[in-house]
Image: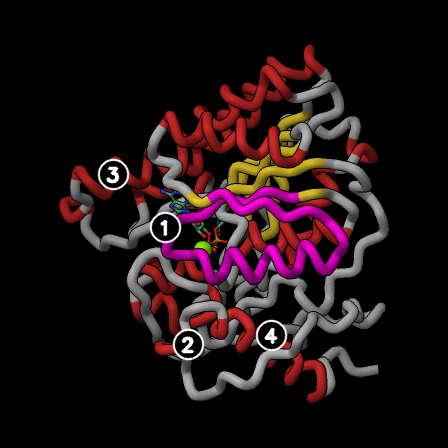
């Protein structure tokens, strides 16, 4: 048995990439774009026995950059968020989720998986990411679930409150909150972190998590799940993203402390700490050129993760089967052995 997808499946993935490009970004589309398929093919799932070393692209990667916020549809290779592979089994039937940063990368993989597990899903993103968001909505609807798109800037407290209210109203309630959006901008010298950058990183990665959770908590029923995306940088910070690493440490303290407080309401709180994952965060200023070219080489697996490789963790933490799981951080670091 081979763990490398047959050529036809690789072609399908490229075809899907073209779908994202067609949704408003065609002018900047790289030459590899093809005519999009009308609908997503039925998910096939990975081979039952698959060697993790042979799956997904490896470094060196083509050096590329995009203005922030970067679009998933313009990346080369395009991240795999489970579009053709994630298969659900009704683990979240009837649940209602709000995912920030649900247009691309890790949040997109969670959104697609949640829908295929039977949940209705609202996603938040920035206006500039509308084309990526519309593509996610198509996947959610093709899974037979409701998709709600709510663009807006999480650095504003009033918007965070409105976002939660609109998601609740349009989904008819809310029982999964995934605080996943983040800003990361690499600076090799501490002195180069401007007040504006520090403010943006803190507001997006920390303040918004507080504001969203404060707005949601009074409405979350017993059994609800809060999930925060942290990072390996919380505990093993890279020297060129110090501001970002501090916010990720804050994410984890928040998870561990809030879990103790809100279990009294029957609400679980957990975090996910990814290692290097191939997402727009990295090409929109999150990495230096060299960091991007060799992205993932420092892990024992020798490659970055693809967002789809995290999807089942977000499902597990939201599902009722995880009823004894709260205050935990789930590491997914490609073999670094943490946390
Ligand atoms: P991504 O770029 O796909 O997702 C980040 C999203 O944040 C964007 O899509 C954007 O919609 C949103 N966002 C940023 N600023 C915003 C603002 N002001 N208002 C509203 N939305 C805003 O990248 P990703 O890597 O999938 O990031 C998701 C999470 O994963 C982040 O919390 C990130 O810190 C974490 N993470 C990523 C990696 C990695 O290697 N990619 C590693 C560890 C942790
Ligand atoms: Mg995005």
Mark 3: which secondary structure? helix
Mark 4: which secondary structure? helix
Q: Earlier in the sequence, mark 2 or mark 1?
A: 2
Query: Which of the two marks, 2 or 1, is nearer to us in this view?
Result: 2
Q: Position of residue 35 (x, y in %)?
A: 57, 84
The answer for how far apart the CA atoms under marks 2 and 3 are is 33 Å
Q: Quadrant of residue 256?
A: top right
**Left or right: 117 with respect to 198?**
right
The answer for how far apart the CA atoms under marks 2 and 1 are is 35 Å
Q: Quadrant of the N terminus?
A: bottom right
Q: Is residue 143 magenta?
A: yes
Q: Earlier in the sequence, mark 4 or mark 3?
A: 4
How many C-alpha atoms fall within 10 Å of the one at disc 4: few (<14), some, or many (≥20)?
A: many
Q: Does the CB distance between marks 1 and 4 fall below 8 Å? A: no
**Left or right: 117 with respect to 245?**
right
Residue depicted at 50% across the width and 25% down the height: 254
Indicate the quadrant of ligand 2 in the picture: bottom left
Would you place residue 39 above or below residue 210 in this image?
below
Which is nearer the eye, 124 or 319? 124
Q: Is residue 260 magenta?
A: no
Say which residue label 4 marks. Answer: 16
Q: Earlier in the sequence, mark 2 or mark 4?
A: 4
Q: Quadrant of residue 151?
A: top left
Say which residue label 2 marks. Answer: 26
Label drawn at residue 238? 1
């Amino acid at each position: 048995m081979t763990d490398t997808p047959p050529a036809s499946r690789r072609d399908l993935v490229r075809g899907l990439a073209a779908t994202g490009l067609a949704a408003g970004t065609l002018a900047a589309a790289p030459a590899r774009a093809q005519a999009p398929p009308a609908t997503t093919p039925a998910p096939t799932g990975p081979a039952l026995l698959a060697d993790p070393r042979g799956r997904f692209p490896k470094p060196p990667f083509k050096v590329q950059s995009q203005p922030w916020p970067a679009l998933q549809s313009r990346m080369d290779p395009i991240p795999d968020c489970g579009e053709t592979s994630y298969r659900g089994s009704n683990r979240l039937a009837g649940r209602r989720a709000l995912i920030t940063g649900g247009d691309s990368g890790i949040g997109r993989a969670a959104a697609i998986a949640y829908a295929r597990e039977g949940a209705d899903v609202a996603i938040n993103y920035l206006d500039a990411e509308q084309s990526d968001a519309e593509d996610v909505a198509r996947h959610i609807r093709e899974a037979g679930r409701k998709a709600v798109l709510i663009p807006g800037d999480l650095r504003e407290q009033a918007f965070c409150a409105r976002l939660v209210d609109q998601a609740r109203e349009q989904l008819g309630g809310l029982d999964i909150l995934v605080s996943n959006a983040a800003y990361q901008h690499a600076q090799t010298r501490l002195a180069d972190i401007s007040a504006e950058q520090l403010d943006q990183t803190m507001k997006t990665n920390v303040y918004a998590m507080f504001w969203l959770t404060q707005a949601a908590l009074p409405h979350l029923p017993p059994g609800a799940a809060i999930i925060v995306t942290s990072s390996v940088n919380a505990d093993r910070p890279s020297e060129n993203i110090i501001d970002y690493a501090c916010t990720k440490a804050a994410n984890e303290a928040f998870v561990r402390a809030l879990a103790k407080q809100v279990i009294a309401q029957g609400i679980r709180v957990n975090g996910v700490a990814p290692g290097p994952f191939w997402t727009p965060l990295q090409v929109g200023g999150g990495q230096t050129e060299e960091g991007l070219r060799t992205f993932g080489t420092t892990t024992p697996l020798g490659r970055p993760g693809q967002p789809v490789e995290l999807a089942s963790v977000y499902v597990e933490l939201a599902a009722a089967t995880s009823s004894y799981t709260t205050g935990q951080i789930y590491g997914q670091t490609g073999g670094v052995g943490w946390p």
